[in-house]
Amino acid sequence: MPTLVWIELQKLFCRSRSYIAFIAIGLIVGVIEWGLRLEGHQVLELLMQNLQEAFLFQGNLLNGYLVTYLVLNSLWLHVPILIALVTGDLVSGEAQAGTMRLLLTRPVGRLRLLTAKYLAGLLYTALVVAFLAVTSWGMGRLCFGTGDLIVFYQTMNIVPEAELPWRFAAAFAYGALSMGVVASLAFFCSTLANHSLGPIITTVAILIGCTIVSTFEVGMFRTVQPFLFTTYLSKWQGFFAFDVQGEDMGLAIGILVGHMAVFFGGAAGVFLRKDWTT
Amino acid sequence: MSADACIIETRALQKRYGSIHAVDDLHLQVEAGTVYGVLGPNGSGKSTLLRLLLGLVWPDAGTIRLFGLPLATHRDRILRRVGALIEKPDFYEYLSAYHNLALLGRLSGLRLERQKILASLEQAGLAARAHSKVKTFSQGMRQRLGIAQALLHDPELLILDEPTNGLDPQGVADVRALIGRLNREQGKTVLLSSHLLHEIEVVASHVLVLHQGQTVVAGAVHDLLECSQARVRLLVDEPQVTRQLLAETMETVHVLEANNGHFVLSMALDQVPLLNRHLVEAGVTVRALIPMRSLEAYFLSIT
């Protein structure tokens, strides 16, 4: 299996499409941090205006950690699209190019081949999130320095600087998991099609549709919200609560892992029975 | 034919796409060491049959055994011994020919040495372009690379779907010679489909003719031609006597064309010497008696 995954990663990184996510993230993080460098202090003062009447704030509030937190918030909608661009193409792209036929005439079981592709997709997703972490955290600290983090999650939380490394590590790990669900969905869609564009568009459409259902607090929507993975995509913010709710976070992680298992199971069900006529 | 000697054996094989019977109740036995041609008009089920044998599509009914093992349960073990080229050869366009072969070799469980890969490319006539990306290759070069990848792991059985497609005349001759060499010198069994009747006649020892997914005929090419009705060209100086003689003594011979002394006859090949004797005994000057022993004529007569 490691050889198969390595082959899949080699193929993946030989394609220019795979670098779009890294270039886009690099550019977006750069632009956001440049904007914050120019006008960040004014914006922060405006936001804190009411609070400053009651509290005294000392130290560097617009620091690298806050920048990383803001980057995370702003990118969380774009990263799934960038990931779907690659993972939605893993199977369908090969079907369209005709190379799947070549792979399937080799003595590699269909399930092993599919699993290798899936793992390569998950590794790619983890690398994209890691790149996001490194650029936002590294550039943020470099340009804005360090300090405590003020975040508004349920209420105002001031997280001491000493706790931030593990909280960010947990948030990014959770982020990688939630992006893994998006990758799994795109991968599942990829097994259904023989053209690469269809699965990518379908994934984004499902993502938008489910996000709408997850966001609106309407009666019928409320019933299905706990079962939708999009409800848990932004749960990483829970790691910046004053008291991290371990049970809630554990449940969210369990639901995301469950979604991944269902999507991969579906992909395997389709792939193993599929007739390759292209 | 004993079951042991069979490299490929299918029984009551069926594959349907919707209401279309792509392969219908197919019984096939391919003996080790033969070159078996699959022939048929477009849509006759040739490609579907080859895909079924490689596990690319699943049968609706029937069984497939290769090397005596059921394909359904021993796919990986079987494919280690099979080299295949199905339809047009598609490769990773963004990789070089060398890199494509190295990658496919590793998928076959082989860690091929550089020299082995280069030798395969040399055999395919692609040594000079080994490190060029496949996207710069012509159709003929891709076809050659397709054959190189099929031979990469030294398989016992080659399954080739129209292997000379897109090749120039020299390339066609090279591939036909290569198939013959692999069969004669290395004892490889070859199953190939082609829409070129002449190709099957030149390359194959056995043939399966498919029509609408069903077997029309199967067997040794030589036997089929011997038993079949062939067209025979006859050139004589005495057309009247010849016409009379054919009508009176050779009832199984049908005159298809008659133009002065030039006749085109339909008759069994084993009757040709007898016809010649009758004509000579009747004092007819026979200038030419040419049996047109062609698979094409046979194919057209049965489909």
Image: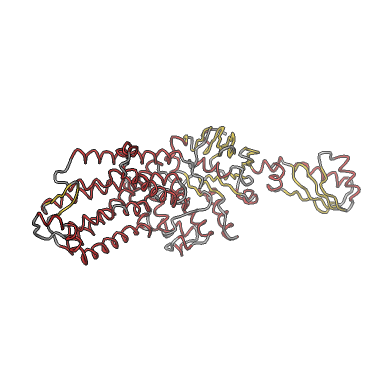
Residue A63: percent from the left, percent from the top? 16, 60
Q: Position of residue A207 (x, y in %)?
A: 36, 47
Residue A160 vs residue A21, the one in the foreground: A160
Q: Residue at coordinates 33% horizontally, 51% vertically from top-left? A: A80
Which residue is at the front of the view, A102 or A154?
A: A154
Q: Is residue A42 above or below residue A95?
A: below
Image position, residue A6 (x, y; %):
33, 51
**Residue drawn 55% across the image and 37% down it:** B15
Scheme of image coloration:
secondary structure
Q: How many marks?
A: 0
Q: Where does the image place residue B66, in percent across and percent down from the top left?
A: 49, 38
What residue occupies the far bottom of the structure in this picture?
A: A38
Image height check: is A53 above or below B242? below
Q: Is residue A226 left or right of residue B203?
A: left
Q: Quadrant of the N terminus of chain A?
A: top left
The reply, left or right, for residue B297 in relation to residue A174 is: right
Please state which of residues A22 and A41 is positioned toward the viewer in this rendering: A41
Nearest the eye: B232 or B274: B232
